[in-house]
Structures are given as structure tokens and as C-alpha cells.
Image (cartoon, rainbow, N blue to C red):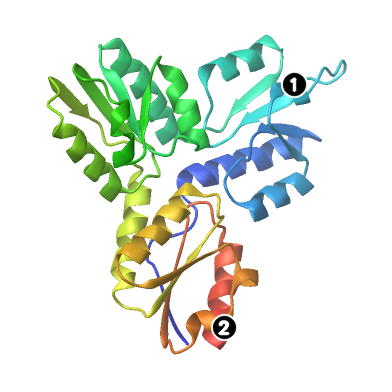
């Protein structure tokens, strides 16, 4: 089996920063609490858990510890501002590993609202990044597709940003649809991560050279899911797998050339063995 690999794939700087921050904290503390999964990759989360990183869904799970000041790590996806304040109010040690590009989106929501815009965010309303970003201004509207257009106001001036890991193709499509509604003013700020865009462009280029694509990463990872959908839309048979354990030989029956790309939270120690095993077929 001939295997071609995307030029741009795997860990982005935001994920690398979050992991290195967690690992440094774990050398200093026996246990660190993380509000939600640090990144969307179960293998990485499991490795960090073995070192003492405990994932909690709320601050109530941490409780009071008289002798130790618990450390709370904010995940790469960020959180609502009131959560940051609650961590401080509880007297916990706060370490913020929010991606700088997510921070930019959060600050933009606040700034654009204060400038009098109705803020629109294009993205998945259930994604933790979006759930955090919408907390930086009142009444932020999340649009994830044409069917959500009914959420828009009838008039006024809008400011539109995007989930950082969203497809540039879909962002452009939604902005175009909004532009047809006749609003007084539209301000569009592209908050999509450039690394995300580069990975998508690299995947599209690879699609035209292979018989089948494998996109590696967590099934809960938004950017990995976007990569898989993008490959399918470009006409190539595509499989979104977490690792080699999910591979089936029937995926490559009749195929001679396979392409591999991976999400921004997929570690090299998942990617490398997948490539090696596939080349052996």
C-alpha cells in the first residue's frame, strides 16, 4: 500500500501549549484539576490522568482542602468569564491554558458588543469553545448552518466571527447568506486559526492524489471532524479513525494509494504507527 501524508497535520501550537502547561504543573503538584478535557484526544487525556490530571465538570467537584490550595487548569477551549471569577472567589490557584486564538475571539466578542454590534458566532453551539465565547457578551447568536438563520434579528448592525476550528468554506457560505438579508452594517472578522486553514488546504490537495483518506483524531474533535467532512466533499472515500485499533482491511480493498491527515489534537505517537502499519499491507 502506497501511503501519502499531508504536509500540514497533527498538533497545533495551542494544543502543544496546553499539554506542556499541564505536564509542567504535574511535576510541581501531585494532582491538578482540569475543567473538562484539556484537549479532544482521549489517549492524551488518559496519559495526563495517569500523571495526576483529574478532569472535573464543575468546581463543586473539587471541594475544600484545608492544607492544600488546589490548582485548576482551564482547558485549551477556554471558558466563560464567570467561571474564571468563581475559581478566584473560591481561593483556588488558576492556570489558564486557553489557546491564544480562542482568547482573541473572546476579547472580540466583548469589544464588538461594546461597539454596538449584535455579535454572531459561526460554529457548533455544543462545542466547549463556543460555550465559553458566548459568555463574553449578552445575547450572542450562534449560527451553525442555513437552518439557524431564523435566529437573526430583522435589522440592525451585525458583527460576525467564527469558531477557531471551523471550516473556512462553511464560514464563507454563512457570511454570504447573512449578507443577502439586507442589514444596515456587517462587520466580519476572520477568527479561524490559520493552522486550521493550512491543514484543510493540505488535506484537499492530498485528496486528489489518493484512492482513500484516513483522518486521525478523536471523534469529539471539531477540527478533525471538519477535516473528514472536507475530504468527503472533495470526492474521496474517507474514514475518521481515532487510531489503528479502529482500522479494518476492508477500508482499503481495491485501493492502491492511501492518504493520511490528522487533527490538531492528534499526537505523533498515534499518527506514526498508523502510517507504518498501513505501509505494511
Of 258 and 173, nearer the camera is 173
Within 10 angstroms of label 2, few (less than 14), some, or many (20 or more) residues? few
Is 240 left, or right, of 41 in this rendering?
A: left
Is 86 left, or right, of 208 in this rendering?
A: right
Asked whether disc 1 touches disc 2, contact meaning CB atoms under 8 Å apart, the reply is no
In this figure, which residue is indicated by the disc labeled 2? 249
Q: Earlier in the sequence, mark 1 or mark 2?
A: 1
Of 272 and 228, nearer the camera is 228
Q: Secondary structure at mark 1?
A: helix
Residue at image position (66%, 9%) is 89
Residue at image position (63%, 14%) is 86
Residue 118 picture location, percent across and down: 28, 18
Per the rendering, the mark at residue 18 is: none
Residue 188 picture location, percent across and down: 22, 31
Quadrant of the rendered image containing residue 249 = bottom right
In this figure, which residue is indicated by the disc labeled 1? 60
Residue 161 picture location, percent across and down: 30, 31
Q: Secondary structure at mark 2?
A: helix
Residue at image position (55%, 88%) is 281
Within 10 angstroms of label 1, few (less than 14), some, or many (20 or more) residues? few
Q: Is residue 240 above or below residue 23?
A: below
Q: CA distance from mark 1 to mark 2?
A: 46 Å
Of 25 and 131, nearer the camera is 131
Quadrant of the rendered image containing residue 92 = top right
Q: Is residue 246 above or below residue 211?
A: above
Is 182 left, or right, of 101 in this rendering?
A: left
Amino acid at each position: 500500500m502506497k501511503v501519502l501524508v499531508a504536509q500540514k497535520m497533527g498538533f497545533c501550537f495551542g494544543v502543544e501549549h496546553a499539554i506542556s502547561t499541564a505536564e509542567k504543573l504535574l511535576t510541581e503538584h501531585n494532582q491538578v484539576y482540569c475543567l473538562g478535557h484539556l484537549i479532544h484526544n482521549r489517549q492524551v487525556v488518559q496519559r495526563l490522568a495517569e500523571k495526576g490530571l483529574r478532569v472535573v465538570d464543575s468546581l463543586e467537584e473539587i471541594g475544600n482542602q484545608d492544607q492544600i490550595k488546589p490548582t485548576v487548569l482551564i482547558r485549551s477551549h477556554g471558558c466563560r468569564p464567570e467561571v474564571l471569577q468563581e475559581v478566584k472567589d473560591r481561593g483556588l490557584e488558576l492556570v489558564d491554558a486557553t489557546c491564544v486564538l480562542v482568547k482573541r475571539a473572546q476579547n472580540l466578542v466583548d469589544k464588538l458588543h461594546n461597539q454596538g454590534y449584535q455579535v454572531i458566532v459561526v460554529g457548533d453551539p455544543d462545542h466547549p469553545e463556543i460555550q465559553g465565547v458566548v459568555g463574553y457578551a449578552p445575547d450572542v447568536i450562534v449560527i451553525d448552518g442555513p437552518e439557524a438563520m431564523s435566529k437573526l434579528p430583522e435589522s440592525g448592525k451585525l458583527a460576525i466571527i467564527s469558531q477557531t476550528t471551523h471550516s473556512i468554506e462553511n464560514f464563507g457560505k454563512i457570511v454570504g447568506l447573512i449578507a443577502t438579508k439586507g442589514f444596515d452594517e456587517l462587520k466580519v472578522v476572520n477568527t479561524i486559526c490559520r493552522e486550521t486553514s493550512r491543514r484543510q488546504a493540505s488535506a484537499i490537495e492530498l485528496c486528489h492524489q489518493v484512492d482513500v483518506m484516513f483522518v486521525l483524531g478523536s471523534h469529539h474533535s471539531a477540527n478533525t471532524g471538519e477535516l473528514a467532512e472536507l475530504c468527503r466533499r472533495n470526492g474521496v472515500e474517507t474514514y475518521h479513525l481515532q487510531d489503528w485499533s479502529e482500522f479494518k482491511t476492508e477500508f482499503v480493498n481495491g485501493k492502491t494509494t492511501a492518504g493520511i491527515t490528522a487533527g490538531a489534537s492528534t499526537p505523533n505517537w498515534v499518527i506514526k504507527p498508523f502510517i507504518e502499519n498501513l505501509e505494511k499491507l
